[in-house]
Image (cartoon, helix red, strand yellow):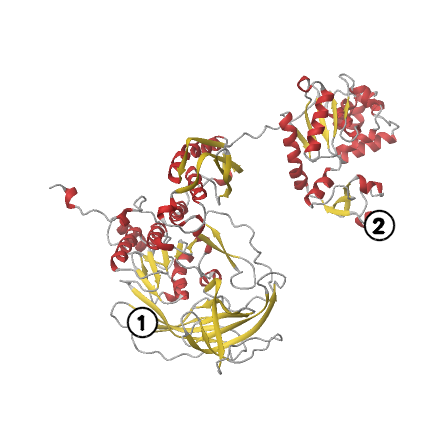
């Protein structure tokens, strides 16, 4: 069996630069515990080497981009490469981020050289500029060949030629095995064995006696006799489910009724693979084009009924409240509905306890009925988040969605209002007026001084006298954006004992919150 | 004459949500004997008078008892939150309908668990049906009716409350409230002609049941967390001596 190995040099640096959205041509190094682990060609040309400390590396190359090591990130960025190769040739084995092996494609591409050329071209199109390929009888030789190939080129080792190819290589190539390999290479060098050919020429008992089991492995490798062991991964099954309507349907109810079977099939298919979907993209096609697409996240996982609900909400449009007459109409007739599971997780992570869940299931069903009445985003789950004003310190997540992008609560948020939290927080502040004892409107000067003592104020109900007031607390924020700028907060207690949080801004007085 | 012709036709509103079952398994109230609570539940399952008590904040326990199937009126947001907080703290689901200016932080301060809270900020023209649907699945529903409601619609909702073992708290007018809670003599400490800030609120809660004299108690909503503490209970109409405190 012939093996093709694809090697992307310095993959950690490539992935880290890509993650940081920087140019791949910049000199860069990935550090692990303060020591250069990997650096790219640009950095090497400036004299940066593996094992340099941070300061030494920066001294050699001041413009060096320093990046933290993150194996997860490397693997994440390597995934698209795996998929690109998989599209051409299934059965890809990811050896480590930056290195993959696949059974060498033969006649289909018109020979190994052509296959490698096609692969390199596809990868360059996909944005992987530095890729090197090697083809040989066994994994080790193929990897060595790939490491010796030029950029975007392929080194072919002819059938049965592994031993000949490896003979001239220095023993330092064993260092790719890590600490064990480095130790063995150093020892071999001190014993006077400088090439793999020297090692291959020794009798096997002597190697085993001196180097143990690892010695036998490298001896077999050096002779090109190591049996290839690859664990090719299974391509992810295509889980997309779709249903076509002939003729196209123009009512939400009809569409929802018709997608039920498909939704059930999707959930059953997933369940047969012990999987559940927690994020699904729903696409509705009209006239051959996708008319509406949206990704829905589920706080737990999607059941068939949940999927049908999401189709309902999506087609109905999430424009808040609407009257019953127009609720059932679709903007354009729907020809096809497609479910694309985007986040699929093992079912075991989501299974319920032996004794069943609490009343939550029922609550979700009941709330889904309310959503069907008033619209998907008209039912919310209140959440707390970090911020300064009362309105910024809370948020509303549509029911059935996961909260994303919330500001952290555990930060100090300097400048936030102390004291009791208001029971009423107006998302859109109401207009108000505040007058002093001469009937003039109260304002705050540029230096933060109140022009008069507030004696009465006007909310939507009418005028009432001020019993007590506190402030002003000047705030100067978001001056760079529309609506920001200098404003002052006041707390005002009315004659009825209700207190209000008022803001005096450039556009006048507003009520932000009420202590009711 | 067959039975069908005798039975009056059901109001459409009454059977919109008639797909469900008697669902709730209320959390046990640690303050009461377990046996007594289980007996109540068995009575409820047998179709007897289903008036299970719903937990309230311990500070309010002497003043008002929430029982399933009842509707209770309040006149301020903090009282509405406080009534819902007891059940929420005991592990029940609560909902707020028609409350666009919901103060989440104050709700948490009074003891509402936001993880088990449903908020419908604008219930729109179907607010009565939305409330009925929430009553089906939640233990306590707080409603701010956007319009006056007639006694008949309120009666339909009351029937739903009894059937589903839920409690309705109405911030505003509602016909046939079991009890009405209002805040009197509200007073803030802290602000003084521009100095200081709002620190603590003192008020008197008045609970009125039917035509009986009001039961009053002084409460304070102290400090940062807007939590509630009871100062003194004054039975009857007799005015208690104001206990001054800072």
Q: Is residue A163 left or right of residue A402?
A: right
Residue B39 on image: x %, y %: 28, 52
Q: Distance between the residues labelled 1 and 2?
A: 80 Å
Q: Which residue is the extreme one toward the right?
A: A192
Task: Give the residue at mark 1.
Answer: B215
Helix, strand or loop under label 2: helix
The residue carrying mark 2 is: A59
Instruction: Specify the quadrant of the image occupied by residue A11.
Output: top right
Name the spot of residue A474 as percent of width and height, x first: 59, 71
Q: Which residue is drawn at 40% across and 45% down?
A: A361
Q: What element carries label 1?
A: strand
Return the chain for callout 1.
B
Q: Nearer the viewer, residue A292 or A356?
A: A292
| A145 shown above or below A414 | above
**Quarter of the image where one finds residue A504:** bottom right
- x and y percent of residue A137 in the render? 73, 20
Quadrant the N terminus of chain A occupies = top right
Subunit of mark 2? A
Badge 1 and badge 2 in a common chain: no
Q: Check disc 2: other Cα within 10 Å, few if <14, some if 14-19, many if 20+.
A: few
Q: In this view, does B84 lie to the left or right of B105?
A: left
Q: How crowded is mark 1: few (under 14 residues within 10 Å), some or many (20 or more)?
A: many
Label drawn at residue B228: none
- Residue extending farthest to the bottom is A438
- The answer to whether A130 is drawn above or below residue A506 in the figure is above
Q: Can residue B198 be seen in this view?
A: no
The front one of A312 and B88 is A312
CB of mark 1 within 8 Å of CB of mark 2? no
Residue B242 relative to residue A476: left or right = left
């Amino acid at each position: 069996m012939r093996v093709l190995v694809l090697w992307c040099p310095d993959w950690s640096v490539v992935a880290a630069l890509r993650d940081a959205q920087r140019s791949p041509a910049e000199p860069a190094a990935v550090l692990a515990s303060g020591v250069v682990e990997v650096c790219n060609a640009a950095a090497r040309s400036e004299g940066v080497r593996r094992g340099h400390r941070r300061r030494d590396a920066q001294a050699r190359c001041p413009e060096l981009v320093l990046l933290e090591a993150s194996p997860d990130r490397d693997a994440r960025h390597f995934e698209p490469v795996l998929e690109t190769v998989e599209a051409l040739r299934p059965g890809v084995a990811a050896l480590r981020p930056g290195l993959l092996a696949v059974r060498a494609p033969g006649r289909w591409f018109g020979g190994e050289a052509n296959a490698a050329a096609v692969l390199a071209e596809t990868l360059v199109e996909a944005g992987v500029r530095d890729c090197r390929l090697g083809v040989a009888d066994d994994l080790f030789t193929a990897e060595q060949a790939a490491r010796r190939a030029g950029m975007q080129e392929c080194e072919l080792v002819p059938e049965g030629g592994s031993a000949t190819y490896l003979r001239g290589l220095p023993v330092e190539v064993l260092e790719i095995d890590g600490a064990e390999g480095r130790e063995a290479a150093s020892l071999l060098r001190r014993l006077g064995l400088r090439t793999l050919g020297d090692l291959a020429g020794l009798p096997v008992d002597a190697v085993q006696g001196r180097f143990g089991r690892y010695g036998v492995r490298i001896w077999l490798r050096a002779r090109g006799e190591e049996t290839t062991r690859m664990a090719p991964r299974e391509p992810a099954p295509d889980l997309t489910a779709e249903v076509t309507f002939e003729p196209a349907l123009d009512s939400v109810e009809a569409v929802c009724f018709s997608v039920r079977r498909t939704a059930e099939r999707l959930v059953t298919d997933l369940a047969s693979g012990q999987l559940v979907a927690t994020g699904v993209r729903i696409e509705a096609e009209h006239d051959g084009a996708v008319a509406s697409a949206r990704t829905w996240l589920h706080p737990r996982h999607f059941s068939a009924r949940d999927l049908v609900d999401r189709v309902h909400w999506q087609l109905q449009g999430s424009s808040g409240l609407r009257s019953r007459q127009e609720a059932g109409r679709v903007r354009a007739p729907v020809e096809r509905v497609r479910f694309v599971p985007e986040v699929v997780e093992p079912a075991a992570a989501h299974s319920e306890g032996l004794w069943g869940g609490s009343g939550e299931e029922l609550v979700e069903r009941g709330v889904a009925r309310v959503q069907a009445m008033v619209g998907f985003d008209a039912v919310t789950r209140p959440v707390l988040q970090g911020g300064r004003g009362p309105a910024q310190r809370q948020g509303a997540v549509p029911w059935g969605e996961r909260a994303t992008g919330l500001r952290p609560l555990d930060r100090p948020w300097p400048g936030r209002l102390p004291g009791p939290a208001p029971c009423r927080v107006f998302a859109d502040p109401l207009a108000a007026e505040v007058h002093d004892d001469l009937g003039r409107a109260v304002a705050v000067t540029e230096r933060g001084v109140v022009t008069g003592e507030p004696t009465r104020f006007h909310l939507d109900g009418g005028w009432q006298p001020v019993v007590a007031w506190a402030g002003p607390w000047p705030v100067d924020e978001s001056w760079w954006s529309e609506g920001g700028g200098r404003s002052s907060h006041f707390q005002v207690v009315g004659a009825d004992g209700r207190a209000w949080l008022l803001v005096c801004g450039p556009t006048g007085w507003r009520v932000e919150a009420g202590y009711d | 004459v067959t039975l069908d012709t005798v039975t009056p036709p059901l109001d459409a509103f009454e059977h919109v949500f008639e797909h469900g079952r008697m669902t709730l398994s209320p959390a046990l109230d640690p303050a009461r004997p377990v046996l007594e609570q289980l007996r109540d539940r068995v009575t409820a399952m047998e179709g007897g008078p289903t008036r299970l008590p719903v937990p309230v904040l311990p500070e309010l326990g002497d003043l008002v008892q929430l029982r399933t199937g009842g509707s209770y009126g309040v006149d301020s947001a903090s009282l509405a939150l406080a009534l819902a907080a007891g059940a929420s703290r005991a592990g029940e689901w609560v909902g707020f309908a028609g409350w666009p200016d919901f103060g989440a932080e104050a709700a948490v301060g009074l003891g509402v668990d936001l993880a088990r809270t449903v908020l419908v900020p604008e219930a729109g023209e179907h607010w009565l049906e939305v409330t009925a649907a929430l009553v089906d699945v939640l233990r306590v529903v707080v409603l701010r009716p956007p319009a006056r409601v007639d006694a008949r619609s309120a009666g339909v909702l009351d029937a739903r409350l009894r059937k589903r073992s839920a409690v309705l708290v109405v911030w505003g007018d509602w016909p046939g409230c079991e009890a009405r809670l209002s805040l009197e003599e509200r007073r803030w400490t802290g602000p003084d002609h521009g100095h200081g800030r709002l620190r603590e609120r003192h008020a008197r809660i008045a609970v009125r049941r039917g035509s009986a004299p009001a039961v009053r108690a002084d409460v304070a909503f102290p400090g940062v967390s807007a939590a509630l503490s009871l100062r003194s209970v004054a039975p009857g109409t007799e005015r208690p001596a104001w206990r001054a405190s800072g």
